[in-house]
């Protein structure tokens, strides 16, 4: 038996603009997916997924994705439990040369699904790490990140960015620009997350920004301004200047709103965080619904969010210095 855990992430800055070649800074957070694998000699894959964010709902299936049970659970949970793991195991077979190996895989995740916190990347990174180790192979974080990226690329029909998988594999703060991902220094970042219980449609939101950018110069300028802001954010990170970081997060949220990817519940949570004294707050990920991230070393923002209408869950999630790790 081998067990690995990998962190989720928030975007400190730069989502959406990163699609047009601007830099972005995702940060790993101490909210993790754990994957246990046991080798099987019959070549079958059996997945058991326990999504703690969905009250421990369990889905099991054996064999290939075509054998999925006909149960009424969210498509994203099934995806996390089956398609992602199927493809992750294909990558494991390719990298180890063990073409016929099978596994029992058990997933437990604290990360809300499809809410901008990198849930699928964390599952994929932990699954590849655990399964390769189970076969006696240890991948370096960068190679692991590459295999995990290929997994997401296959499952998401080519619509994957390297940010989530790299961040989950390496931990810490990451700078992404095009295909170039690298770890950067960051101080302790007192993140507070607010979750509205929903999820945005990433494909639709990305398409919306694309259309806006084609139609209006202001949208093209806004995307470029996000890039400038990310560069300023990198300096603030290097200086450990939390106040500056918070202010830049506020600016970034305003620019994302202008690009049409915020929502009433995200705006409400952002304002609740600011009113509670957070240093800054913004949506994280594709937007449309899901999560905001605020910066607050005090307990005030978490408390305020827990009383905010439309906020289903509020919690602290410190920067995860460590990426994927073997637990057993
Ligand atoms: O919602 P997430 O965490 O998958 O982030 C999407 C980030 C975008 O920049 C909107 C899209 C992308 O592929 O980079």
Image (tube, grey):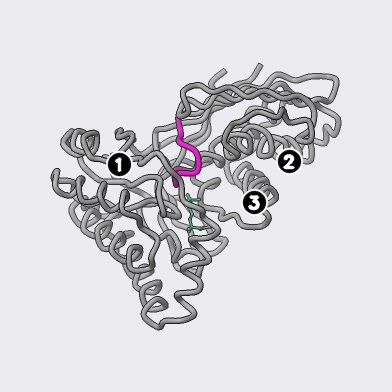
Q: CA distance from mark 2 to mark 1?
A: 40 Å
Q: Which residue is mark 2?
A: 91
Using a 10 Å C-alpha cutoff, classify the residue at mark 2 as few (fewer than 14 neighbours), some (14 to 19) or many (20 or more). many
Q: Which residue is mark 3?
A: 156
N-term-proximal mark, 3 vs 1: 3
Pointers 2 and 3 in contact (C-beta within 8 Å): no
Q: Assess mark 1: CB under 8 A from ligand 1?
A: no
- Judge whether residue 326 can be spotted in this image: no
* 55 vs 294, nearest the viewer: 55
Viewer-proximal residue among 180 and 216:
216
First in sequence: mark 2 vs mark 3: 2
Quadrant into which the N terminus falls: top right
Cα distance, mark 3 to mark 1? 29 Å
Per the image, label 2 sits on a secondary structure element best described as helix
- Residue lying at 45% horizontally and 74% vertically, measured from the top left: 212
Disc 2 to disc 3, how far (Cα)? 15 Å
Boundaries of the magenta span: 110-118
């Amino acid at each position: 038996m081998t067990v690995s855990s990998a962190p989720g992430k928030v975007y400190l800055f730069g989502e959406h603009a990163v699609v047009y070649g601007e830099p972005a800074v995702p940060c790993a957070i101490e909210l993790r997916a754990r994957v246990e694998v046991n080798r099987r000699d019959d070549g079958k894959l059996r997945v058991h997924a326990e999504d703690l964010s969905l009250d421990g709902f369990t889905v099991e299936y054996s064999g290939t994705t075509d054998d999925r049970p006909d149960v009424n659970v969210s498509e994203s949970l099934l995806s996390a439990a089956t398609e992602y793991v199927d493809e992750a195991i294909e990558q494991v077979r390719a990298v180890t040369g063990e073409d016929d190996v099978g596994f029992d895989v058990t997933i437990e995740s604290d990360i809300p699904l499809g809410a901008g916190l990198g849930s699928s990347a964390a599952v994929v990174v932990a699954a590849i790490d655990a399964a390769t180790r189970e076969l006696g192979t240890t991948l370096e974080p960068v190679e692991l990140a590459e295999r995990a990226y290929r997994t997401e690329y296959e499952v998401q029909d080519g619509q994957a960015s390297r940010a989530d998988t790299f961040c989950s594999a390496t931990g810490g703060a990451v700078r992404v620009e095009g295909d170039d991902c690298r770890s950067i220094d960051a101080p302790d970042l007192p993140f507070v997350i607010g979750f509205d219980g929903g999820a945005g449609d990433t494909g639709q939101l990305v398409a919306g920004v694309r259309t806006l950018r084609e139609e209006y110069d202001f949208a093209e300028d806004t995307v470029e301004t996000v890039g400038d802001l990310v560069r300023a954010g990198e300096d603030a990170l290097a200086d450990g200047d939390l106040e500056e970081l918070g202010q830049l997060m506020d600016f970034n949220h305003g620019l994302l709103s202008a690009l049409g990817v915020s929502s009433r519940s995200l705006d409400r949570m952002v304002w609740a965080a600011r009113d509670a004294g957070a240093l800054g707050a913004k949506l994280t990920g594709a937007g449309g619904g899901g999560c905001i991230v605020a910066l607050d070393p005090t307990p005030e923002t978490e408390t305020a969010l827990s009383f905010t209408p439309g906020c289903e869950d509020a919690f602290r999630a410190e920067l995860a210095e460590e990426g994927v790790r073997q637990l057993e």
